[in-house]
Image (cartoon, rainbow, N blue to C red):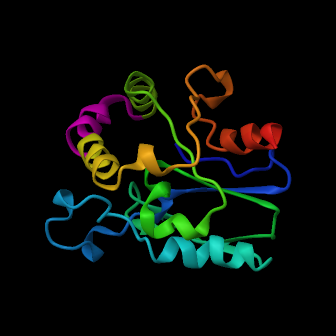
Amino acid sequence: WRHSWPGSSPQSITVHTDDFYLPPASRVANWEQIPCANMNLERLPAQVPTPARAGQAVPYRAYSCRAGAYLPEQCFAPQPLVIVEGSYSCHPTLADCYDLGFRHLPKEEQARRLLTREGERYSGFTARWIPLEEGYFAKFQIEQTVDFILDTTLLTFCKFQRSAPANLLQNML
């Protein structure tokens, strides 16, 4: 499930909010009851948008939930386009990090993608992660605060090619 970095998307960096989960030991008590409490919303802007806006390299160290550890740091050269993708990318504390914000993934498409990606772990996502995301969307009114909504359902290249949003945006710009 590990993404491929944007070798196919020149002049861009694609960053995944899934890489900014907090290790379980660093989460607050009852984090499952607090929308976005499983995310490191301080590390993400410090490691990605802040250096990128300054024209600096982006030192990136993903946290792998599956491995239960941080992966080795990678450093990406400055690029004119930085894409932060993922459900939690539109959290209000990150709003000043971006020039544009958008999202859209119908529930049916989300279920299809998760089932394909997670296989037998799918029921865990529907029991834990989907309710957390829905609580986050409702609490922070994400649909009302984004700059635009993009329906990716019909885009065939979005089949878990995690760098696909970079290709899409480059074609739009």
Q: Position of residue 102 (x, y in %)?
A: 56, 45
Residue 129: which quarter of the image?
A: top left
Q: Position of residue 78 (x, y in %)?
A: 81, 70
Q: Is residue 63 left or right of residue 25?
A: right
Q: Which residues are magenta?
A: 118-128
Residue at the location (58% across, 42% down)? 148
Residue 16: which quarter of the image?
A: bottom right
Q: Quick one: which residue is furthest to the right in this view?
A: 10
Residue 132, magenta (yes or no): no
Q: Position of residue 167 (x, y in %)?
A: 76, 40
- Position of 77 relative to 8 (above/below): below
Q: Nearer the viewer, residue 160 or 93?
A: 93
For the stretch drawn in magenta, the main secondary structure is: helix
Q: Quick one: which residue is furthest to the front in this view?
A: 144
Q: How many marks on residues?
A: 0
- Position of 11 relative to 161 (above/below): below
Q: Is residue 113 left or right of residue 58?
A: left
Q: Is residue 117 left or right of residue 123?
A: right
Q: Nearer the viewer, residue 23 or 133?
A: 133
- Position of 115 relative to 121 (above/below): above
Q: Position of residue 87 (x, y in %)?
A: 44, 48
Q: State the quadrant of the C terminus.
A: top right
Residue at the location (40% across, 63% down)? 21
Residue at the location (43% across, 27% down)? 106
Q: Is residue 18 left or right of residue 83?
A: left
